[in-house]
C-alpha cells in the first residue's frame, strides 16, 4: 500500500475495505494493537487479531488505561484476553501499529507513535495513518469489525462473538444511544453465536466494593438543576469511576443530562451523558472544556481531558474555587474563558 493516507469513503463495500486493510500487512510484520480498554475496544482488538491470524508474524494488544470497571475486568477474565499496559512494552519492537475505537490525538501518550491503521467510530480528528476507516455514524467499532469478519467469511468463535456482541450492546446502550441499521445487523448476526451466560455475568459485574465510597461521595455532592445532574469528586482512582457515576445519575427518571468530573493524576476528566434529540453531549463537552484540553464525543456521550497545568493556579489555592469554576463551565459552557492565569476563581 502506498504511504499516502487513505480515508475510506462511506460507499466502500465490506470487501473493498477488507482488501485495503489486508494490503497494509505482510507475513513478517510484528503488529501492535493499541486501545483504551473498554468492551467495544477490547472486542475490536480481538477481531483485528483474528483477521490477522496467519497473515503476520505476531500480534500483541496493549492498553493505555488502568482498568478498574468491574464489567471490563470480568470481560477480560472470562474471555482470557491477553492485554498489557503500553508502559510495560516497547512500541519500537513492532513495525506496524494499529489503534481501534480511538484515535492518536485522543491521548498525549500516543503523540510520538506512527500508526499504520486507525479504525474507529468517534468523530474524525487529524490523523496521518496510511489506512483509516472512521465512521462516526456507527454506534460501535465492534460493528465495523464484525463487517470485516463477514467480508473475510470468518465465522467468529463463541468468545469473539460474545465480545463483539457485548461491545455493540454497551456502546449503543442497547440501542438507546446513537446507532445505525448496520449496528442492528451486526447484533443480529452475532446473537446466535454468543455465550448467553457469559454476557449475563459480564453485565451483572457492575461495581466493586471499593467503588462504594465514590457512590457515598457522589450522593453527598451531586448538584441537580432542572434536568441536569453534575458532580465533582475531587481525586479518583480512574476515569472509569467517573463513567460509572455519570451513568448512575442518568437512571433518575427526570435527569436527561449528567456530568461527572474528577482529577486523575495530573488531569481533570469530565464524562458527559445526554438523552434527547435537541441536546448534544459532544458539543457540551467542547464548549465547556475544549479550550483547556481535548474534548468531544457523540450526541449521547462525550469526554473531556484537561491538563491541570492549563488551568489558572489560583483556582487551586482557595477552597471551593475549583468546584465553582467547573460548575460555571458546566452550566454556561459557551461563556468566554481563558486558559491558565486568566480563569476566574
Image (cartoon, grey):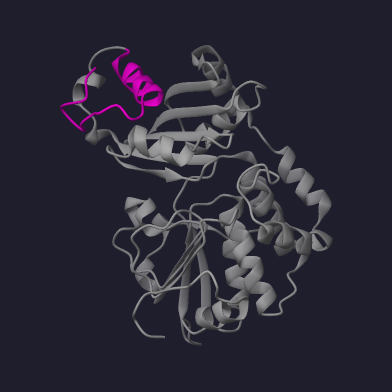
Quarter of the image that includes the N terminus: bottom left
Q: Is residue 127 magenta?
A: no
Above or below for 109 versus 44: above
Residue that protrudes farthest toward the left in the picture: 341
Residue 214 left/right relative to 148: left
Which x, y percent locates residue 89? 41, 62
Residue drawn 56% across the image and 84% down it = 55
The residue at the far front in this view is 278
On screen, residue 225 versus residue 306, left or right, reads right
User: Residue 182: x, y in percent?
Assistant: 67, 61
What segment is highlighted magenta in the picture?
320-345
Rendered position, 35 above or below 31: above
Q: Is residue 214 toward the left or the right of residue 128 in the image?
A: right
Across and down, in percent, residue 144 comes to 60, 65
Write down the quadrant of residue 317 in the picture: top left
Which residue is rendered at x = 70% and y = 63% of the image? 160
Q: Is residue 192 above or below residue 296?
A: below
Q: Does residue 339 belong to the magenta stretch?
A: yes
User: Does residue 92 show up?
Assistant: yes
Q: For residue 251, which quarter of the picture?
A: top right
Look at 43% across and 22% down and name the residue there.
232
Amino acid at each position: 500500500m502506498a504511504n499516502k493516507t487513505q480515508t475510506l469513503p462511506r460507499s466502500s463495500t465490506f470487501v473493498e475495505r477488507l482488501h485495503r486493510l489486508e494490503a497494509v500487512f505482510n507475513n513478517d510484520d510484528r503488529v501492535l494493537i493499541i486501545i483504551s480498554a473498554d468492551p467495544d475496544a477490547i472486542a475490536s482488538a480481538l477481531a483485528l487479531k483474528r483477521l490477522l491470524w496467519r497473515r503476520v508474524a505476531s500480534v500483541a494488544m496493549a492498553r493505555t488505561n488502568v482498568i478498574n470497571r468491574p464489567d471490563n475486568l470480568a470481560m477480560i477474565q472470562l474471555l482470557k484476553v491477553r492485554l498489557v499496559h503500553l508502559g510495560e512494552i516497547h512500541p519500537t519492537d513492532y513495525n506496524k501499529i494499529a489503534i481501534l475505537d480511538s484515535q492518536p490525538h485522543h491521548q498525549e501518550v500516543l503523540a510520538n507513535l506512527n500508526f499504520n491503521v486507525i479504525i474507529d467510530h468517534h468523530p474524525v480528528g487529524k490523523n496521518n495513518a496510511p489506512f483509516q476507516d472512521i465512521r462516526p455514524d456507527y454506534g460501535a467499532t465492534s460493528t465495523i469489525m464484525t463487517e470485516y469478519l463477514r467480508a473475510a467469511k470468518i465465522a467468529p468463535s463463541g468468545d469473539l462473538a460474545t465480545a463483539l456482541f457485548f461491545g455493540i450492546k454497551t456502546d449503543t446502550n442497547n440501542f438507546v444511544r446513537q446507532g445505525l441499521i448496520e449496528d442492528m445487523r451486526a447484533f443480529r448476526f452475532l446473537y446466535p453465536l454468543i455465550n448467553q451466560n457469559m454476557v449475563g455475568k459480564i453485565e451483572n459485574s457492575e461495581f466493586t466494593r471499593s467503588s462504594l465510597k465514590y457512590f457515598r461521595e457522589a450522593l453527598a455532592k451531586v448538584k441537580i438543576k432542572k434536568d441536569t445532574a453534575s458532580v465533582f469528586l475531587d481525586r479518583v482512582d480512574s476515569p472509569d469511576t467517573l463513567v460509572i457515576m455519570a451513568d448512575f445519575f442518568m437512571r433518575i427518571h427526570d435527569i436527561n443530562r449528567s456530568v461527572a468530573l474528577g482529577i486523575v493524576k495530573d488531569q481533570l476528566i469530565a464524562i458527559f451523558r445526554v438523552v434527547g434529540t435537541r441536546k448534544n453531549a459532544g458539543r457540551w463537552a467542547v464548549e465547556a472544556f475544549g479550550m483547556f484540553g481535548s474534548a468531544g464525543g457523540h450526541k449521547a456521550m462525550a469526554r473531556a481531558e484537561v491538563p491541570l497545568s492549563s488551568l489558572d493556579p489560583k483556582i487551586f489555592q482557595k477552597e471551593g474555587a475549583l468546584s465553582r469554576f467547573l460548575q460555571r463551565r458546566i452550566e454556561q459552557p459557551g461563556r468566554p474563558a481563558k486558559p491558565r492565569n486568566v480563569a476566574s476563581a
